Image (cartoon, rainbow, N blue to C red):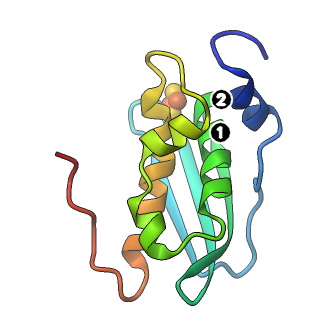
Amino acid sequence: MSGPYNETVRDHFENPRHQWRMDQPTVVADAHNPVCGDRVRLFLRLEGDTIKEASFQAQGCPASIAASSMTTCILEGKSLTEARALTNEDVERALGGLPPGKGHCSVLAEDAIHQALRVLPGEAGPRAPKA
Ligand code: FES
């Protein structure tokens, strides 16, 4: 794949990390972009307060696949508090940026994280909206 994507994005799209259906995850969450129809399913396995394993399945554009892949890389080893603070801007930065007009594609992964965290026991519900 060539085109508007940088090398990191291309690598995560062509060789997605952790793209598999997890058996017996602690939590599964789905995110969907109603405009383009792209979907991401995120699987997390926790030990205590730590995300030991993260994986995903996706039907989407190259940017959303790359963002999901990078998200799972970032999440592994993070505490729930750290995961809760993760934003799509963090994912985009880790990817070295997305082309103009593709920033919304990284929001799917962020949505999936926050859907997952919302259903975990002890979590205080949705994050406050961004200012
Ligand atoms: S075009 Fe739908 S998430 Fe990228």
Q: Quadrant of residue 25?
A: bottom right
Q: Residue drawn at (46%, 15%), measured in percent from left and top?
A: 100
Q: Quadrant of residue 104?
A: top left
Residue 17 in the image, given as x and y percentages of width and height: 77, 50
Task: Locate the C terminus and report the quarter of the image it occupies.
Answer: top left
Residue 65, which numbered label? 1
Visible residue check, residue 61: no
Identify the residue at the far left of this view.
131
Q: Is residue 65 shown left or right of residue 100?
A: right
Q: CA distance from mark 2 to mark 1?
A: 5 Å
Residue 108 in the image, given as x and y percentages of width and height: 47, 45
The reply to whether callout 2 and callout 1 are in contact (CB within 8 Å) is yes
Helix, strand or loop at disc 2? Answer: helix
Q: Residue drawn at (79%, 17%), measured in percent from left and top?
A: 1
Identify the residue at the far right of this view.
15
Q: Dot 2 surroundings within 10 Å: few (below 14), some, or many (20 or more)?
A: some
- In the displayed structure, would residue 3 be above or below residue 18? above
Query: Ligand 1 closer than 8 Å to the CB at disc 2?
Result: yes
For disc 2, the marked residue is 62
Residue nearest the viewer, comparing 78 with 55: 78
For the residue marked with disc 1, what is the amino acid?
Ile
Residue 73, which numbered label? none
Residue 109 in the image, given as x and y percentages of width and height: 51, 49
Q: Is residue 75 shown left or right of residue 57?
A: left
